[in-house]
Amino acid sequence: MGRHCLVVAETGVRYPHSDLFNMINCPTCGDYYESDRSMRHHHSISHNKRLPNSKCNTCDKEFFSKSGERKYCDECLSFEGENNPNYSAKKKKTNCEICDDEFKYYPTEKSGLFCANCVEEEEWRTTPEVSSGKENHRYNSIAINCSYCGDTNKIPQSEVSNKNYCDMICYSKHRSEFQKGENNPNYKDGEYKKSEFYQGNWERVKRNCKIRDNNTCKVCNSSEKLIDVHHIKPVRLFDEPNNAHTMDNVICLCRSCHMKIDHGNKELPKDLNSSNV
C-alpha cells in the first residue's frame, strides 16, 4: 500500500487514495473521516465548535440545531421588540360596533369588533332562535323503542338503524350481553377459542388483504379510520379455522362498520361476497 496510501489523522488507519473520494474531510484541519457523523464529532471535540446542520428559511444562514428540525436561526426566531406578536406599537385603533367608543386591539385574521367594556356586558348578546316546524332538524323524528330496555324515544329518521338505544349506557349493556356465549362470533362448542381461530396463515392473509384493499373500508370507503380485516363467512362456521383465512373470504372494514355488521346493525353489500371480493 505504501506511498499510494494516506494515514488518516488520529485513527492511524491507512487508506488507498481511491477510498478518499468516499470520505469526509474536516473543514478546519483537513483530516479525513469515514462518515459525516465522525467528522462532526471530531470537530466539536478538537475544535470546540459544532458545525451547522440546518439552514434558516428566512435569511438562509446556516446554523446548528440540536434536534436538526429547527427551521429558523436565533436571530429570525427572536421575539424581542417588533418581532413580538404582542408588541404594543403594533396595536391598531377602531371603533366599537356597539358603543362606538374607540379602542386599540392587536391585529389578527379577524378585525376588532367590540371594546373590553361591551364584551364584559352580556346584555347585548342574544340567544340564537331555535327553528321550528320543518326547519328544525328533528321535525321528522319518529318514535323508536330502545333495543335494550324497550323505552320509547324520538330520534331523527336519518339516525334510525336496525338497533337503536336510549344512550351509550343501554348500548354498552346490550353489547356486553350480546357478546356472551353463543352470540359471540368466536364461540364454538361451548368454548371461546380465539387463539385457535387466528393461527396458521392468518397474519399473512390479514396483511395481504389490507394491501389489496388499499387499507380502505369496502363499505364506507374510508381510509382515515382504524381498519380491520373481516371474515365474510365467520371463522366459527369452519371445521378447520385455518380454512377461513383465505383472500376470497376477507375484506377490509373500518372499526365502525365492522362492529355494526358483527352485531347485526348493518349488512354487507350484496356485491361483497366470497366470489367477487
Image (spheres, helix red, strand yellow):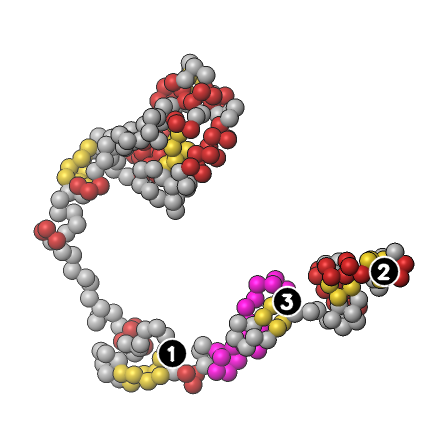
**What residue does disc 1 label?**
106
Q: Residue at x 57, y 78 (%)?
A: 75
Residue 67 lies in the magenta-colored region: yes
Neighbour tally class for label 1: few under 14, some 14-19, many 20 plus, Cα within 10 Å: some
Name the residue that disc number 3 marks.
53
Mark 2 and mark 1: Cα distance apart in space: 67 Å
SS category of the residue bearing label 3 = loop
Picture quarter with the N terminus: bottom right
Can residue 177 be seen here? no
Of residue 230 and residue 21, the one placed in the foreground of this image is: 21
Span highlighted in magenta in the image: 66-84
Which amino acid, mark 2? Cys
- Disc nearer the start of the sequence (3/1): 3
Q: Is residue 165 left or right of residue 205?
A: left
- Mark sitting on residue 96: none
Q: Which residue is mark 2?
A: 5
Establish if 154 lies above or below 81.
Answer: above
**Within 10 angstroms of label 2, few (less than 14), some, or many (20 or more) residues?**
some
SS state under label 2? strand
